[in-house]
Amino acid sequence: MTKRILITGGAGFIGNHLVRLFVNSYPEYQIYNLDKLTYAGNLENLKDVESKPNYHFIKGDITDKDEMQNIFKSHFFDAVIHLAAESHVDRSISGPDEFVLTNVVGTVNLLNAARTHWAGKMEGKLFYHVSTDEVYGSLGPKGAFTEFTAYDPRSPYSASKASSDHFVRAFHHTYGIPVVLSNCSNNYGSYQFPEKLIPLMIHNIKYEKPLPVYGKGLNVRDWLWVEDHARAIDTIFHKGKQGETYNIGGNNEWTNIDLVRRLCGIMDTKLGREAGTSEKLITYVQDRAGHDMRYAIDASKIKAELGWEPSIEFDKGFETTIDWYLEHSDWLNHVTSGAYLNYYSEQYADR
Ligand code: NAD
Ligand code: DAU
């Protein structure tokens, strides 16, 4: 069945994988990628699909409510998969306002556009909101976030995502908009902007720059291959129950320091350096303010109800990812130039 699907933030890290998956798997769907192309959005990520007949790009800003109304009016979308966001926790600490505007106001603008243009014809429509495990707060050494864990966001980023989740549920209950939500753990894979831990460390190891590990490096994250996240979104989009939330995770917890050491070891081998060379670059720096200690996802609901689980062992996904960054030095060099470098020096000036 044909569908007109709006994917927001499709030029970003997760978005480009999702757009590629949908464009290639569903030639009968028309995929509209709406993106503002902030520092994190890069159309080069989608070169391989840009000439496909079912792919369309719209340069747009979700914070512009009139623009969102007009785009909905002219495109007759059947569904929205909403990923556009400011996504980096450190940026939210140095400048929270942009996170409120994009993540909260932007989401409400999209919900309002759906409410206006889907009024009286909600049947078959779907607003899918892509969210994060960070809304649940920080865990101690044991336990994992379930879909029933109370929200306890602790950074401006997670507070803005939690707020957007609440608005999505409120529009479902108040106006009957058909919605579904998912909350995912940390993603790794190709095309991730190198302000995030793994591509930043790969870049710095390659160029023998310091590896800035926050605090003692003992914070724990649950890593999932980005293409498995895209598959999970596909599964939930097609099989998820309206009004429901699904947690998505990799069942793959690492302390930051163990992950960075592992990366150093693999990179030494790949770059033909003596074992132990890259570890010497590890530099403990001032901790992130309010740094959440541990995230872990209980993904049993999506497995039991929809049959999704991660497809790839971490060792394989991690090595594939490292190879990708080493083989795509043009991509990495491109995104690490200009504005990114200014940001980088501001971010790390006092660390
Ligand atoms: P990203 O920062 O790589 O990409 C965000 C995209 O949104 C960019 O292409 C950017 O240009 C676009 N965008 C930003 N502001 C916009 C605006 N005002 N209008 C239109 N487009 C705009 O982010 P990501 O890591 O791909 O994350 C995508 C979504 O998934 C986010 O909602 C994030 O909260 C969520 N998420 C991310 C992870 C992760 O590990 N990266 C994990 C769980 C959930
Ligand atoms: O959990 C899902 C979230 O994962 C997403 O919602 C966010 O959009 C995404 O950015 C990610 O958030 P994190 O803050 O966990 O990711 P980040 O890559 O910034 O950091 C991962 C861990 O590594 C975290 O504990 C902070 C630490 N870190 C990060 C950087 C950039 C360092 O020690 N040094 C660094 O230079």
Image (tube, rainbow, N blue to C red):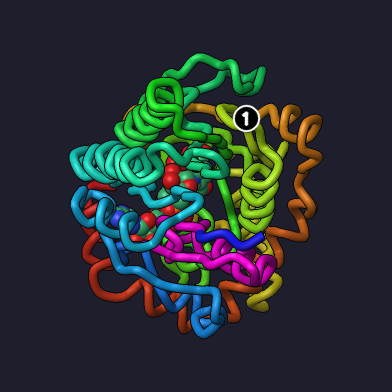
Q: In this view, does 224 lie above or below 199?
A: above
- Left or right: 236 as drawn, with respect to 48: right
Callout 1 amino acid: Ala
Residue at 50% x, 50% y is 79
The N terminus appears in which quarter of the rendering? bottom right
Q: Name the residue under label 1.
A: 296
Q: Residue furthest front?
A: 120
**Residue 88 visible in the displayed image:** no
Q: Does the residue labelled 1 lie within 8 Å of ligand 2?
A: no
Which x, y percent locates residue 36? 29, 62
Residue at 33% x, 41% y is 107
What kind of element bears circle 1?
Answer: loop
Q: Quadrant of residue 163?
A: top left
In magenta segment, residue 97: no
- Left or right: 244 as drawn, with respect to 166: right
- Left or right: 344 as drawn, with respect to 66: right
Q: Is residue 128 above or below residue 311?
A: above
- Left or right: 340 as drawn, with respect to 172: left
In magenta segment, residue 14: yes
Which x, y percent locates residue 174? 38, 21
Q: Is residue 241 above or below residue 315?
A: above
Residue at 41% x, 78% y is 333
Q: Nearer the viewer, residue 9 or 156?
A: 9
Which x, y percent locates residue 74? 33, 62
Q: Which of 272 and 47 is in front in this view?
A: 47
- Magenta residues? 5-34
Which x, y percent locates residue 10? 45, 62
Residue at 57% x, 63% y is 17
Within-10-Å neighbours for mark 1: few <14, some 14–19, many 20+ = many
**Residue 148 visible in the displayed image:** yes
| Count of labels in the image | 1
